[in-house]
Image (spheres, grey):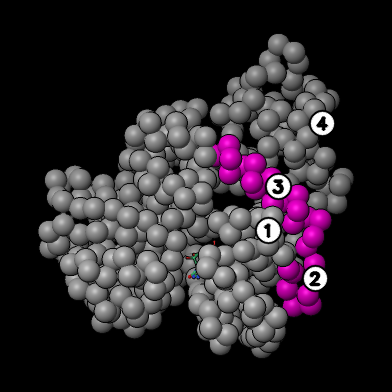
């Protein structure tokens, strides 16, 4: 069976269920893929229930083990525990184990689930609805730039007039923020002297002749093409002058605009959309994220409040991480315990990569039930040298009574609170041997 045939088979299995519980992961890719499945069931007027979880551990398992039919989305592939349940379908893209239950996972068909197809893309390939959510999930899962199957889906989306691709600044709020905030709130791309400093951002824009008292509320999309070019050039020159050549590389790239979503809302740009979903999921409200994906206005309003909170938390986390990051030889380490929430330590590590990209990043936070939450992030250049964070974490956490996994480029784990030193040594040994 090839991947497309397996997707068709998975669709048949899903629709053979009479009232399944759709159990999806809580991050942007989990919320988008869960929403694609929910939407498919709604379109067919079928019964379903929906639930999000952070991870499939004994605690969450105990709550769902009596269910007759479950569709796992963006989780399940790496966990044999699903074989103990009744009727199950797994739709996932994490590194899979051999399961007795049916699973659709690109990695089983020679497609890299870490870089070429996310869970949202896999769910789209199964149900063929909500193509824009497939792109939002891929972007949210750090699968940028879109290649392989993700690219095919993007091209289909363009043909269907649901997605437009532009080459532009990759900062948050191109249409939804006044220019000084557009620059100063930019934490995904850190601009020295400007990120978190609105008055400096204002002066920077003034010096470039792009802002005055009358048009201070204009957004980036209100600028003319020429003015946008001036801003891009100004930002690149600024980054290079401050010694941030690496960051300059992240500044401009492809962006994906979603024509079915309201213009000038935070949902129009796939990357902004995914940030909103992360804000919902990482702060315990993944259900609001599903509402946003399904076009519910009330959910969107709530998501904007969560976004505000999320951005504040990330800002605090990044400022702390920048001052406290330390080099432990084969990797960089951020001890965020007591300062950075476990839900966003991974996001903070991902953002720190735009400045520190020579070694993998390991961040830790206080986890649930006497555990430490580990989040690790790397980039394509480290992966090409043989680094596999998912395998490294799975191996080093298992040996000390924890559990973990994920992708080559982004992975997480939970370990017992008193086993940090052992974990770090295991991890350092494992990555030194493999890369
Ligand atoms: O939590 P974080 O964002 O760091 O997770 C990165 C990736 O690792 C996610 O795709 C997540 O599903 C995976 N992960 C995992 N097992 C864990 C924690 C995270 O497979 N215990």
Q: Is residue 274 visible?
A: no
The part of the image, by quadrant, that contains residue 383 is bottom right
Work out how far the residue at label 3 is from the one at label 2, CA to CA, in angstroms: 21 Å
Q: Which mark is residue 200?
A: 4
Of circles 1 and 4, the one toward us is 1
Q: Are marks 1 and 4 in contact (CB under 8 Å)?
A: no
Question: Toward the viewer: 247 or 68?
Answer: 68
Work out how far the residue at label 4 is from the one at label 3, CA to CA, in angstroms: 19 Å
Q: Which residue is disc 2 drawn over?
A: 327
- Categorize mark 4 by other alpha carbons within 10 Å: few (<14), some (14-19), many (20+): some
Q: Which residue is disc 3 drawn over?
A: 316
Question: Toward the viewer: 189 or 50?
Answer: 50
Work out how far the residue at label 2 is from the one at label 1, CA to CA, in angstroms: 20 Å
Question: Toward the viewer: 250 or 325?
Answer: 325
Which badge, 2 or 4, is on the more N-terminal residue? 4
Q: Magenta stretch containing residue 353, yes or no? A: no
Element marked by disc 2: strand
């Amino acid at each position: 069976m090839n991947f497309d045939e397996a997707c068709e088979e998975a669709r048949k299995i899903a629709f053979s269920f009479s009232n399944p519980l759709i159990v999806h992961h809580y991050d942007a890719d989990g919320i988008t893929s869960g929403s694609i499945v929910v939407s498919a069931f709604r379109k067919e007027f079928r019964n379903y229930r929906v639930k999000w979880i952070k991870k499939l551990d004994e605690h969450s398992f105990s709550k769902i083990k009596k269910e007759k039919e479950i569709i796992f989305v963006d989780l399940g592939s790496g966990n044999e525990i699903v074989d103990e349940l009744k009727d199950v379908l797994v739709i996932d893209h994490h590194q899979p184990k051999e399961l007795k239950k049916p699973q659709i996972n690109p990695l089983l068909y020679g497609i890299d689930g870490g870089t070429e197809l996310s869970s949202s893309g896999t769910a789209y390939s199964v149900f063929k609805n909500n193509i824009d959510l497939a792109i939002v999930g891929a972007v949210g899962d750090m699968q940028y730039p879109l290649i392989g199957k993700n690219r095919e889906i993007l091209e289909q989306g363009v043909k269907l007039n649901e997605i437009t691709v532009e080459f532009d600044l990759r900062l948050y709020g191109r249409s939804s923020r006044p220019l000084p905030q557009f620059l100063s709130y930019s934490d995904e791309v850190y601009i020295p002297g400007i990120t978190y400093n609105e008055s400096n951002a204002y002066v920077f824009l003034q010096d470039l002749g792009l802002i005055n008292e009358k048009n201070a509320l204009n957004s980036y999309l209100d600028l003319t093409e020429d003015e946008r070019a001036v801003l891009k050039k100004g930002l690149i020159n600024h980054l290079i002058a401050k010694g941030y050549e690496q960051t300059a590389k992240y500044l401009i790239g492809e962006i994906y605009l979603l024509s079915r979503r309201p213009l000038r809302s935070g949902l129009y740009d796939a990357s902004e959309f995914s940030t909103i979903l992360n804000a919902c999921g990482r702060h315990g409200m993944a259900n609001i994220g599903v509402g946003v994906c399904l076009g519910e206005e009330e959910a969107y309003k709530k998501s904007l409040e969560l976004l505000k909170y999320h951005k504040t938390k990330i800002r605090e986390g990044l400022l702390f991480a920048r001052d406290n990051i330390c080099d432990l030889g084969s990797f960089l380490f951020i001890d965020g315990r007591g300062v950075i929430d476990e839900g966003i330590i991974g996001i903070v590590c991902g953002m720190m990569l735009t400045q520190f990209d020579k070694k993998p990043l390991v961040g830790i936070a206080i986890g649930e039930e006497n555990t430490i939450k580990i989040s690790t992030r790397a980039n394509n250049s480290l992966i090409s040298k043989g680094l596999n964070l998912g395998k490294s974490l799975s191996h080093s956490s298992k040996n000390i009574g924890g559990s973990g996994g994920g992708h080559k480029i982004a992975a997480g784990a939970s370990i017992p609170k008193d086993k940090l030193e052992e974990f770090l040594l295991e991890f350092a040994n494992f990555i030194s041997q493999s890369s």
